[in-house]
Amino acid sequence: MKITVAGVNKEVKDGLTIGELIQQENVETPEYVTVSVNEEFVDGQDRNEKSLKDGDVVEFLYFMGGGSHGFNR
Amino acid sequence: MALTDKQIERYSRHIILKEIGVKGQKKLLNAKVLIIGAGGLGSPAALYLAAAGVGTIGIADADVVDLSNLQRQVIHTTANIGKAKVESAKEAMEAINPDVKVNVYQTFVDSTNIRELIREYDFILDGTDNFPAKFLVNDACVMEKKPFSHAGIIRFKGQLMTYVPGQGPCYRCVFKNPPPADAVPTCKQAGVVGAMGGVIGSLQAMEAIKYITGVGELLTGYLLTYDAIKQEFHKVKLPSNTHSCAVCGDNPTITELVDYAQPTCELKQKH
Ligand SMILES: [Zn+2]
């Protein structure tokens, strides 16, 4: 089946779970990545079970710091 | 208030734009923007907002200029090492544009002072580097109903999104809670290309200018990500369901600000 991951079209095996996709994509610090499928958030505990469907649009949203650190003691 | 001849000349490249014009320039001159963090993101943002003639610019940062800042924090100079960042930034902004009134806050922004701090401003730029601060800025802006631009940079990547009350998800809608300290690498640990602050901080300035002048579409409901390795931007449409958010949702559980115990950047550590 075909899915879109971070804007890129990919051919993946049928029934691939989000957890498997996270492994395939070598997602850094997966436990702190927000996942959306077709513009809906998928919670951490649902990722291993939830299978993707043909045409799904998956996004990984990462924590990014940066800037200045003169804040909070 | 009419623009002076000098102002018409200074802002001529704005005024000639049909989307901005004299009307938009006056909006900029009457606007108040607060930049939290005079660092990698805040530096370019402050320079561009000052140059654009944003009438009042607040800048908050407790730090002093350090040699290791100068690779990316372009508002500061070698001569200003050891000087308060907010004073250094004020100097630079005033040198660019005497029209700008700069308010400096050489203070740690925390749960006790942030709401009061942001209250008098029209738009807030988050130029902080640690996640507790980013959540604090978000929650305070949600509570005070202030629009703000979130941004983050690390290594060769950057991202930003804009929150406007009632018009889309907030930072907490997307990221829920700060990660534990050191679970996610920070710039100090992982590095960042200096120009990344220029790319993303300038985009934040653009969001502020667009919000003030009402031109075009903001990054509300979107996270714009930038990958310098691939030299690619990717605009992610965010889920529009904000009902369950702990701070901006229908039944918020966060109704008071909290200071999360530990910032991810250890401040006391020598560079
Ligand atoms: Zn929210």
Image: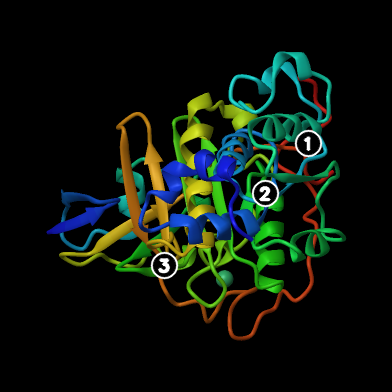
* Quadrant of the drawing holding the N terminus of chain B: bottom right
On what subunit does the disc labeled 3 rest? A
Determine which of the numbered discs, if any, sits on residue B248 in the image: none
Q: Quadrant of residue B6?
A: top right
Find residue B27 and report its horizontal and vertical position in percent: 57, 60
The chain to which mark 2 is attached is B
* Mark 3 residue crowding within 10 angstroms, few (<14) / some (14–19) / many (20+): some
Q: Tag 1's secondary structure?
A: helix
Q: Are marks 1 and 3 on the same chain?
A: no
Q: Crowding near pointer 1: few (<14 within 10 Å), some, many (20+)?
A: many
Disc 2 to disc 3, how far (Cα)?
20 Å
Of residues A19 and B19, which is closer to you in this image?
B19
Read off the residue under disc 1: B86
Q: Chain of mark 1?
A: B
In this view, A22 is above or below B246:
above
Amino acid tagged 2: Pro
Q: Which residue is mark 2?
A: B180
User: Nearer the N terminus, badge 2 or badge 1?
Assistant: 1
Residue plotted at (20% across, 67% down): A53
Q: Residue at 53% of width from left, 52% of height from top?
A: A32
